Amino acid sequence: MSFNLVSSSKLSRQALPYLQKLALSTGMTAQLSLPHAEGALIIEVCDSPNPLRIAARPGTIAHFNCSAAGKIFLAFLHFDEIAQLATQGLFKSMTAQSLAEPDELKLELQRILGRGYATDDQEYHQDVRCLAAPIRDERGTVIAAITVTAPTGIFARNQFADVAQKVKKTAIDIGLTVYRPQLAANQK
């Protein structure tokens, strides 16, 4: 999948106000990621208003299998390639909770496809949770992901449903603004 630099820059620029609003409304750090051959490439980060912040910086490539954005791209773009990606050594065990076996990962990806969001529940770093939703272009193709990240002390598991609703809405709003501006204008 190719995603040119001009499109990436436009997406990043137009997504920034939404990321800032999401960081403020959730109290978590918000990130924008693009699909990459080795995982999720973080291109934009809006830090949490909380003093306790944990998030990778732009330019970081998060592993497919243990990052929320990486799992979004696996589920929506690479579901049929899990075995090949595993044999390429792209699935890493960062913590005891990391899903690195193709069979258990496929079950998780099916859940992601069903609910429309992915989580990283201490799979990349101990005591850190993330939740990501896909951003779609005008054809409905997943072209990016938006993620919120926070320490487990701030982001409890029982908040997943509420946070997922905000992240999914933000992802839809970004997709409409960037790829379907005429529809976004009608939403206001």
Image (spheres, rainbow, N blue to C red):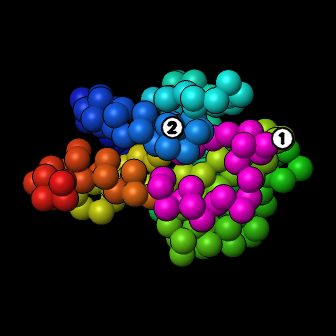
Q: Secondary structure at mark 2?
A: helix
Amino acid type of the residue that numbered disc 2 sits on in the rendered structure: Ala
- Is residue 125 covered in magenta? no
Mark 1 near mark 2, Cβ–Cβ under 8 Å?
Answer: no
**Residue under circle 2?**
23
Q: Earlier in the sequence, mark 1 or mark 2?
A: 2
**Residue under circle 1?**
126
Q: CA distance from mark 1 to mark 2?
A: 21 Å
Near-viewer residue (13 or 142)? 13
Amino acid type of the residue that numbered disc 1 sits on in the rendered structure: Gln
Residue 128: % across, % down: 75, 41
Residue 102: % across, % down: 72, 63
Q: Secondary structure at mark 1?
A: loop
Is residue 60 at all visible to an observer of this figure?
no
> Residue 142, located in which quarter of the rendered image?
bottom left
Magenta part of the chain: 147-167
Residue 10: % across, % down: 25, 32
Q: Is residue 175 left or right of residue 21?
A: left
- Is residue 161 covered in magenta? yes
Report the residue at 59% width, 39% height from top.
28
| Dot 2 alpha-carbon crowd within 10 angstroms: few under 14, some 14 to 19, many 20 or more | many
Q: Quadrant of the C terminus?
A: bottom left
Q: How many marks?
A: 2
Q: Is residue 53 left or right of residue 181?
A: right
Residue 182: % across, % down: 10, 54
Report the residue at 49% width, 37% height from top.
24
Report the residue at 23% width, 47% height from top.
177
Q: Please, is residue 105 above or below residue 10 in the view?
A: below
Near-viewer residue (124 or 173)? 173
